[in-house]
Amino acid sequence: MTNSPSDNSTDSGVAQEPTTTLRQQRKTWVSVIGIVAAVALVAWVFGGRFGTDPRLVDSPLIGQPMPDLTLNYLEQEGALTFSDLKGQILVVNFWASWCFPCRLEHPALTSAASAYADQGVHFIGISYQDKTAAAIGFLDELGRADGYSYVTDEDSRATVELGVFGVPETFFVDANGIIQGRVQGEVTAVILGNAIEDLLAGRTPDL
């Protein structure tokens, strides 16, 4: 006895329904497993940095003496020699007039420089790959502060010795001339204040 066409259709539908459902379940589980794996990977990569500012970076320079640089002043004759500032806490910031994040962080830098000028803290702004006129125009527009020296890095010596790849970038140096912190990217008033207070208290900044 042979099956009719209608019988074949019915049998086929009954036989395929569980198979289709099983395939859908497998696809769902594969998707779920993929999402879980992706989340786990992200957690593993960033877990060690969770709760910290991603701009704050480890560096082989941390704990090492600040290079004894001599850099020409941006707006006056003469040069600044870093060793002459030993005994003071230094905040060394690389910046440029064409750098948008530099523009954003400038008020925080000048405010902190003014606030700590009489507490043995000196700020140094190093003009990075910029034209002198443009750099001065930047300061004319956004302002200067007491306790702040602006210098140039004409031969890129400071850039090379400190391993700077872009701007803005900021280094924190204690009164003994040892680099204690580094921030790649825009600094904030909170970062500056916390780091300086730690250095004034003789502590390593908790960056």
Image (cartoon, rainbow, N blue to C red):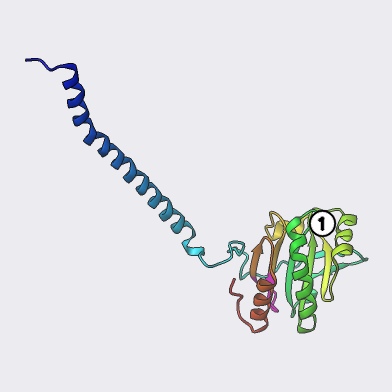
- Residue 152 at what x, y percent from top left? 83, 60
Q: Dividing the picture into quarters, in which one does residue 125 lie?
A: bottom right
**Image quarter hosting the C terminus:** bottom right
- Residue 183 at what x, y percent from top left? 65, 64
Range covered by the magenta-colored residues:
172-180
The residue sitting at the left extreme is: 1
- Identify the residue position indicated by label 1 in the image: 97
For numbered disc 1, what is the local secondary structure? loop
Query: In this image, 107 relative to 35: left or right?
Result: right
Q: Dividing the picture into quarters, in which one does residue 172 lie?
A: bottom right
Q: Which of these two is toward me, 169 or 175?
A: 169
- Residue 30 at what x, y percent from top left? 34, 44
- Residue that appears at 89% across and 60% down: 136
Q: Judge whether residue 181 can be spotted in this image.
A: yes
**Image quarter hosting the N terminus:** top left
Query: In this image, 33 relative to 156: left or right?
Result: left
- Is residue 130 located in the magenta-colored stretch of the structure? no
- Residue 101 at what x, y percent from top left? 73, 59
- Residue that appears at 73% across and 71% down: 91
Query: In this image, 10 relative to 205: left or right?
Result: left
Query: In this image, 89 relative to 25: left or right?
Result: right
Q: Which of these two is toward me, 92 or 19?
A: 19
Crowding at mark 1 (Cα within 10 Å: few <14, some 14-19, many 20+): many
- Is residue 176 located in the magenta-colored stretch of the structure? yes
The residue sitting at the right extreme is: 77
Q: Judge whether residue 74 can be spotted in this image.
A: no
Residue type beneath disc 1: Ser
- The total number of labels drawn is 1
The correct choice, above or below, for 126 with respect to 26 in the image is below
